[in-house]
Image (cartoon, rainbow, N blue to C red):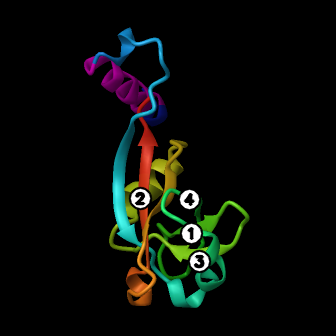
């Protein structure tokens, strides 16, 4: 069984185990993979994008396997393509592996702390949909 098929089956079985298979409504539950501050805030365009961001804003994750500093690098961008920074290297492994396997990982702004230092100003939440 391929990895993607395995994870698809696994995520589908989670809905079955919780009884959502009996529901006629679409399952909108999420499996949180990571909650972390954005890395690299001062080096990219996060300051420019910050006024338009709010809690719940959707973000785009993009693998960057050619990154010279970390082969598992995952960029974080706004939906308009503004590069905010990266998933921190200490937390990126599961995100990059899921993306490499074709499993769609969603990302959104969890919280914005405008008075915090740049390394903790934007908090991200990464998840996969369970339904």
What residue would you read off at disc 1?
75
Label 3: few (<14), some (14–19) or many (≥20) C-alpha neighbours in 10 Å:
some
Identify the magenta region: 5-18
Q: Quadrant of the N terminus?
A: top left
Q: Nearer the viewer, mark 2 or mark 3?
A: 3
Q: Residue at x 46, y 58 (%)?
A: 96
Q: Would you say residue 15 sits in the magenta stretch?
A: yes
How far apart marks 2 and 1 lie (CA) works out to 14 Å
Mark 1 closeness class: few <14, some 14–19, many ≥20 residues within 10 Å: many
State which mark lies toward you, 2 or 1.
Answer: 2
Q: Where does the image place residue 128, in percent across and percent down from the top left?
A: 44, 43
What is the number of the mark on residue 125? 2
Q: How many marks?
A: 4
In whole angstroms, how far apart are the C-alphas of marks 3 and 1? 16 Å
User: In the figure, is residue 29 to the left or right of 101?
Assistant: left
Other residues around mark 4 within 10 Å, as few (<14) / some (14–19) / many (≥20): some
Question: Which of 38 and 104 lies nearest the eye of the viewer?
Answer: 38
Q: Quadrant of the C terminus?
A: top left
Residue 90 point in image, percent of width and height: 33, 72
- Is 84 colored magenta in this rendering? no
Badge 1 marks a residue whose secondary structure is strand
Residue at the (64%, 76%) spot, across then down: 49
Q: How far apart in space, not on screen, are marks 4 and 1 (Cα)?
A: 16 Å
Visible residue check, residue 75: yes
Which quadrant of the structure image shows residue 3?
Answer: top left
Q: Mark 4 near mark 1, Cβ–Cβ under 8 Å?
A: no
């Amino acid at each position: 069984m391929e990895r993607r098929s395995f994870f698809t089956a696994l995520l589908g079985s989670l809905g079955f185990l919780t009884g959502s298979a009996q529901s006629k409504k679409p399952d909108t539950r999420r499996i949180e993979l990571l909650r972390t501050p954005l890395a690299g805030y001062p080096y990219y365009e996060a300051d420019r994008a910050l006024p338009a961001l709010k809690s719940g804003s959707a973000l785009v994750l993009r693998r960057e396997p050619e990154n010279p500093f970390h082969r598992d690098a995952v960029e974080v961008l706004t939906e308009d393509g503004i590069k905010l920074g990266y998933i921190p290297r200490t937390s990126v492994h599961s995100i990059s592996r899921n993306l490499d396997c074709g499993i769609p990982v969603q990302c959104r702004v969890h919280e914005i702390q405008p008075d915090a230092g740049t390394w903790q100003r934007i908090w991200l939440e990464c998840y996969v949909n369970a339904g």
